[in-house]
Image (cartoon, helix red, strand yellow):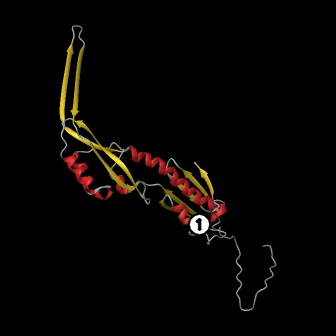
Amino acid sequence: MEKIQISVNNDEGNEVVIRTGQAQELPVQQRETLRGVITTPADWLEQRTEAEDEYLKFSEMSTIVDKEDGTITLRTNDRNLRHGGFTIIGSLLMDPKLQELNINQEHKVAPKSLHQKLKFLRHLFADPEEHQSTLEKILKFKGAVTQVLEKEDNLKGSKLHHFEQKLESEFDCRFTLKAPVFKGFNSEQFEVEVCFQIDGMSVLFWLESIAMENLIQEKKSAIIDSVTERLRELGVTVIEA
């Protein structure tokens, strides 16, 4: 065995321990993942502006922005993976209560089902009286169904069967909601239309809103840009997917 001379300068009373043999590999810390609303990455980092150290360097962080998916992902310790780090994912989420209505999803339901759903979402309506009148219109829906069956059989053996069913109704139901489009943000006002179609001898309803779709596209980009700018101001590298 090779002899190694070691010189130790030690204050009296302190213990010196010398170990021989192969040293164990240093442990690799696990990366921790946190999830939240779209502002979570910027909120998390702004709370740590005074805690920057060798393991939390803003210059060694990166952010991936995906506007199509509505996500912002912040990664710390990108250059020093041995020390673990954090992955903070912020997502732009639809407001849960508004999502229950399945607006613009072509989710078709019976009149009683829609009535029951709207009945308990009065707080989303801009006008309480309009909420009541909307419920009444849905329950009192009236329409006339016309069925036409055409048959044609010529001498050459060709046959034609045509069945057509039409629904005639003066039903016109629209209402205005005042609700957050995205979770954690302020309320917006927009009009919603109750659409209907005939299904056999039954009627199905669903909800559509061009105004809400326009709000989603308009606000989505503005919100993500706002959070991205906060991260840039802290010196974090931003990459747009």
Q: Quadrant of residue 93?
A: bottom left
What is the residue that sits farthest to the bottom in this orientation?
Answer: 13
The foreground one among 83 and 134 is 134
Give how far across and how far down residue 63 sits, in percent: 59, 56
Determine the image quadrant of residue 231: bottom right
Is disc 1 surrounded by few (<14), some (14 to 19) or many (20+) residues within 10 Å? few
Q: Residue at x 26, y 43 (%)?
A: 205
Which residue, given by chain and number where applicable, does mark 1 sit on? Answer: 29
Left/right of residue 86 with respect to residue 192 in the rendered view: right
Q: Label 1's element?
A: loop
Front-most of residues 45 and 146: 146
Image height of 209 relative to 229, above or below: above
Position of residue 79 measured from the top left corner of the image (x, y, whole percent): 66, 60
Q: Nearer the viewer, residue 199 or 3?
A: 199
Q: Position of residue 78 (x, y in %)?
A: 63, 59
All told, the count of numbered labels is 1
Is 141 displayed left or right of 42 in the figure?
left
Outermost residue toward the top? 155
Query: Which image quarter: residue 122?
Result: bottom left
* Picture residue at 24% right of the left edge, 8% below the top: 156
Q: Position of residue 57 (x, y in %)?
A: 65, 65
Whether 147 is drawn above or below 120: the answer is: above
- Residue type beneath disc 1: Gln
Q: Where is the N terminus found, in terms of image quarters?
A: bottom right
Residue 209 left/right relative to 119: right
Residue at 80% across / 79% down in the picture?
A: 6
